[in-house]
Amino acid sequence: MGIDLDDADIESEEELVEHIYEHMKNDEARERERSAERRKSPGQQRAEASAKTAKQLLREIYRKLASAVHPDREADAARRAEKNELMQQINRAYATNDLLTLLETQVRLELIDPDHASKISRERLQQLNRLLSEQLETMKTELWSVQDAFCIDHGLPHASPIDARNLHLVIKHRARELRAHINQQKGFLEVLANKSATKRWLKGQRHLLD
């Protein structure tokens, strides 16, 4: 059956049958993977290959930064604290595929010079541009989500632009609410300052509770 038993620890017929079934199951799983791969369109295969290459590119940049910044290699306590905070930022950027932050950190630490783009290959530059484009689309989606939440919270029409005019309307509305609340509290304090009025108010509250 094409099964190598040299390294198999088999002491009974039951273990042999189990080993054969395990081998057959693994073969079937590999064949399903190969079949699924063959069914993919050229576009899907290119997209997956591009995503894999992009992840490798991010990992490469991350490893260079981690090697340069790692706080355990810093003897000075203050510098170690700074590097620890920077390392946390780098970790967050890598976890969220934030290529822009990683590249900015490389420039800031002088690991690459501003003319670095002119020295890299065309294929690598295309990968960087693709990653940055994907990051831009993600940021646009997040921005629209924040704007929608702002509109809902402040009673603005859906998808209204957050411009100076709309912000002025929001501020005016909020100022009216605050003035009304202040006047209400002033009236309440005036009632409390008068014992007779306070007693009448308390009686009224008891009647409401009853």
Image (tube, helix red, strand yellow):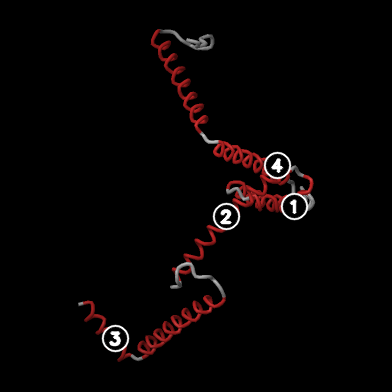
Instruction: Residue under label 4, please give it.
Output: 123
User: Mark 1 is on which residue type?
Assistant: Val
Q: CA distance from mark 4 to mark 3?
A: 78 Å
Horizontal side, residue 68 vs residue 138: left or right: right
| Residue under the point 42% across and 82% down | 181
Note whether 64 is above or below 185 in the view shown.
above
Amino acid carrying mark 2 in the image: Glu
Q: Secondary structure at mark 2?
A: helix
Residue drawn 79% across the image and 51% down it: 115
State the CA–CA distance, disc 1 to disc 4: 21 Å
Mark-to-mark CA distance, 2 and 1:
23 Å
Distance in Å between CA atoms under marks 4 and 2 = 21 Å
Between disc 1 and disc 4, whose residue precedes?
A: 1
Left or right, 123 with reference to 55: right
Q: Secondary structure at mark 1?
A: helix
- Mark 1 and mark 3: Cα distance apart in space: 68 Å
Residue 140, position as x, y percentages in the image? 56, 58
Answer few, some or many: residues within 10 Å of disc 3's Cα (few below 14, many 20 plus, some between 14 and 19): some
In which quadrant is the C terminus drawn? Answer: bottom left
Residue 138: image location, x then y, percent:
56, 54
Who comes first in sequence, dot 3 or dot 2? 2
Residues at discs 1 and 3 in contact (Cβ within 8 Å): no
Q: Earlier in the sequence, mark 4 or mark 2?
A: 4
The residue indicated by pointer 3 is: 201
Residue depicted at 65% across the width and 49% down the height: 99
Residue 86 in the image: state x and y as whole percent: 67, 52
Which circle marks residue 107 in the picture?
A: 1
- Looking at the picture, which amino acid does disc 3 mark? Trp
Residue type for callout 4: Glu
- The span from disc 3 to disc 2 (Cα, nearest Å) is 58 Å
Circle 2 residue: 137
Mark with earlier residue (1, 3): 1
